[in-house]
Amino acid sequence: MKLDRQLCCGVATLFLVGNVMVAHAGQVAIFNRFGSFQVEAQSLQEKGWDRVVRQQYDFSCGSASVATLLTFHYQRETSEAEVFESMIRAGDAEQIQRHGFSMLDMKRYLDAQGLNSDGFRISLDDFIRIGVPAITMVNTAGYKHFVVVKGVDANNILIGDPAAGTQVVPKDHFESLWDGTVLGVREEIEIARKNFNNEQDWAVRPDSPLSVGVNRSSLGASLLTLPARNEMGR
């Protein structure tokens, strides 16, 4: 696909309005008739930022997406500031501040890091079959926004959104927002595949933390020592 200047409108909020993760971290006290115990909990909001670089400016979803791709999928630790400053210097600063970075800006940056990249128009099925992370654009009510596709399962697309963290999006909904283009890296394919569908990214849908907070063996031993119904006046 020939790369034109597909621009990211930085004021786009994530396409999952109403599904923003809100919770609080810390110790949670669980009470029952036998007493209480503490469970260490991390908020869903915090968990969603474990493996996504947050954009610092309204128009910087492109630089944050590149930093996310490099840091968490190609094992090249990269800050958004580093990408942002480099792409601003190499591009049209006035245009970027008005409309955001383009796929062409991001391609040039990745190429300069020795990661040959290209834009492709591709079906979702073919993209899933290839199985590597990539940057793509979604369009929400006219706002264009770059995100990283981090994984897929039978029914969902796993998105690293620099405005909202890691999100699990139903396939049908994703396709309604997606224009079918991706920016993909041609190099280091094995590293990319290893870091696609990473279980740490899918941890935004964790199991209950009770199994972590409770020592099952000691709980069982405690229950065995409880008085029976006919003991101690019960």
Image: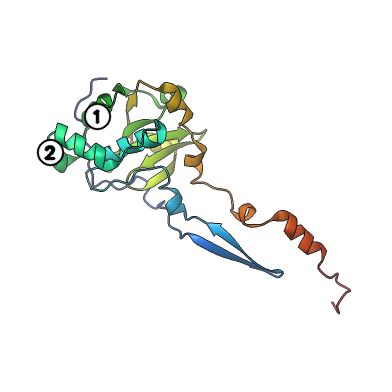
Kindly identify which residue carries mark 1.
109
Q: Is residue 73 left or right of residue 6?
A: right
Q: Quadrant of the N terminus?
A: top left
Q: Is residue 75 left or right of residue 109?
A: right
Q: Amino acid at mark 2?
A: Ala
Q: Position of residue 193 (x, y in %)?
A: 46, 26
The percent position of residue 200, horizontal first and vertical second, equals: 49, 41
Q: Residue at x 47, y 55 (%)?
A: 43
Q: Is residue 131 visible?
A: no
Image quadrant where residue 184 sits: top left
Direction from residue 95 to residue 198 in the image, left or right: right
Q: Is residue 169 or residue 209 the one in the foreground? A: 209
Name the spot of residue 135 as percent of width and height, x first: 33, 32
Residue for point 46% across, 31% down: 195
* Label whose residue precedes the other's in the sequence (1 or 2): 2
Query: Label 1's element?
Result: helix
Q: Position of residue 70 (x, y in %)?
A: 35, 33
> Is the C-beta separation of discs 1 and 2 under 8 Å?
no
Residue type for callout 1? Tyr
Closer-to-camera residue (155/129):
129
Q: How many numbered marks appear? A: 2
**For discs 1 and 2, the disc positioned in front in the rendered view:** 1
Return the mark for residue 93.
Answer: 2
Residue 64 sits in quarter: top left
Crowd rating for badge 1 (residues with CA inside 10 Å; few <14, some 14–19, many 20+): many
The residue at 40%/52% (across/down) is 20
Q: Spatial distance from mark 1 to mark 2, Cα to Cα?
A: 15 Å
- Taking the spot 41% from the left edge, 42% from the top edge, the residue there is 51
Rendered position, 139 above or below 5: below
